[in-house]
Image: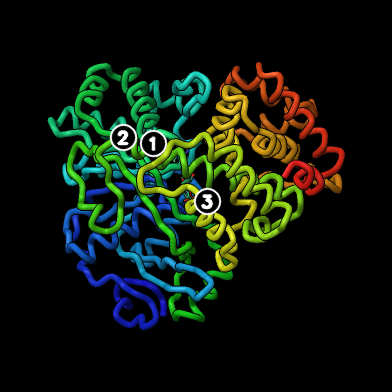
Amino acid sequence: LRLNAANLPELEHATVPTYDRASMKHGIVHVGVGGFHRAHLAVYVDSLLEQLKLKDWAICGVGLQPFDAEMRNALVPQDNLYTVIERSAPGSKARVIGSITDYLFAPDNAEAVIAKMAHEDTHIVSMTITESGYFYNENTHELMTDHPDMAADLAGAHPPRTFFGFVYAALARRYEAGLKPFTVLSCDNMQKNGHITRDMLLAFAKHRDPDVAAWLAQNGAFPNSMVDRITPRTVEEDVVNLREEFGVEDSWPVVTEPFSQWVVEDKFCDGRPAFEKVGVQVVKDVKNVEEFELMKLRLLNASHSAMGYAGYLSGFQYIHETIGHPVFGKFIKNMMNEEVKPLLPKIPGVDVDEYIQTLIGRFSNPTLKDEITRICLGGSGKLPQFIMPSIAEQIVAGGPLRRLTLATAAWFRYLRGIDEQGHDFQLSFDPRNDELQKIARDEGNPMKLLSIGDLFGDDLRGDERFVKELTESYNALERDGAMKTVERIA
Ligand code: NAD
């Protein structure tokens, strides 16, 4: 049966929303309605609307990128309904999510997006815009003002091109109208995602209007959060499977795992729903969020990146196959236990060994079919967040860093876009692929990549032990291939 509001009561094999979607106000505007948002925040909000019968907290989805037309084309004819398929070894469950009740596509109507954010019913603007959407220079910690899209928005381009351009335009209207600013809630995988959001947005606002910037600094809120739910890319087989197993015809369902976690700092300037009633860990102290973030990014995301590039070079297609291979299983477990765990703060109530065990179990979920090519997306935003900080700390501590370094060398080797049989392959998307691939190919020397100032700090380049390890690993990858090199270092 075709998924839409009229057919909801007829769907027999999926859980469906029973609340009145038509009468809802949009308390949340979410930018970047991709797989992850639809498996995470939108699901928590769906639970809130269902269980607490809230009326003011539906989500208006927003796509800023031209390629978001595909999501609009999928969602709008389905009344913005879609299915979350939760997969695990015992079987799958299907749940139709109703919390997104409108979708705006900025390339068609930028004004509607700005007006929606500026509307007094909007209390939170949340986003999953990937690491590159923040224009954050890792080395200077400043806004990349010279990026062409950012430069255009700083000069007042209309319509805006970047997330910050849209958010600023809406906030400036609220300032003029005497409203409160909305909370800007990042749900991207970045250490201190709230702080980065605040710093980049305030830097942006200062360029445009110091009065708006001062008002926002005084009254705005940018909670830090740790988000976690592995959400693979949807493939055609998932669409077919949903139709055959659950009788739901959905043009773009989302597949995810049973596990879900969200730890968010309780810092909202214009109200929030009772997230804690639906399993969210809302915490008062930013330190708690930072500790959870650190643990998750440096264990889960770092392991993903380590499996991704070395796994791709070794010919794996999925994460569960990679972790299931004895060589890679040993490599990842040892990397987590010996090189990352000793650097992590102790979190009261969290047993890090258990956390690592759970992670291995989640990586091993064979029903999820998480593709290596997805894990390899956007390395320039990931490695500096997930792997490099642990290396920098091990340099200071004089501790082990060989496996983390091998993960980095594998990324550098991958960036050449030439496989171990000498054939060209298409790199997974990264906004900096052209620049990185050129350096990786021309020079064949990992130091050239390491000298890219806005990705890697001087602490790494200047360390003799790390540079030696990196060069050796890189040469071994070239000479012996990934599998043999991982086996030796694992
Ligand atoms: P996706 O490809 O399904 O969706 C990405 C979304 O980001 C799209 O809507 C796209 O339009 C938007 N986007 C990308 N670049 C943008 C930019 N420069 N400006 C504005 N919007 C932009 O990917 P996804 O799986 O939904 O992941 C998105 C982000 O969510 C990740 O980068 C990560 O930070 C976070 N996340 C994902 C997972 C996961 O397992 N997929 C888990 C935790 C966190």
Q: Residue at x 29, y 31 (%)?
A: 169
- How far apart are labels 1 and 3 at the CA level? 18 Å
Which residue is pictured at 31% across the width and 76% down the height?
A: 8
Q: Is residue 382 visible?
A: no
Q: Nearer the viewer, mark 1 or mark 3?
A: 3
Horizontal relation, residue 479 to residue 231: left or right: right
Q: Using the image, tell me which numbered label, if any, was put on residue 356.
A: 3
Q: Earlier in the sequence, mark 2 or mark 3?
A: 2
Q: Quadrant of residue 448?
A: top right
Numbered-mark total = 3
Q: Secondary structure at mark 2?
A: helix
Q: Which quarter of the figure has residue 294?
A: top left
Q: Residue furthest left?
A: 178
Q: Crowding at label 2, few (<14), some or many (≥20) Cα neighbours within 10 Å?
A: some
Q: Position of residue 98 (x, y in %)?
A: 31, 64
Query: Element type at marker 1?
Result: helix
* Depth order, front residue of 168/350: 350
**What is the x, y in percent for residue 272?**
20, 46
Name the residue nearer the viewer: 246 or 91: 91
* Mark 2, residue position: 286
Tell me which amino acid carries mark 2.
Val
The residue indicated by pointer 1 is 290
* Nearer to us: label 2 or label 3: 3
Apparent side of residue 290 relative to residue 313 in the rendered image (left or right): left
Q: Please say if 44 is above or below 250.
A: above
Q: Are marks 1 and 2 in contact (CB under 8 Å)?
A: yes
Q: Amino acid at mark 3?
A: Ile
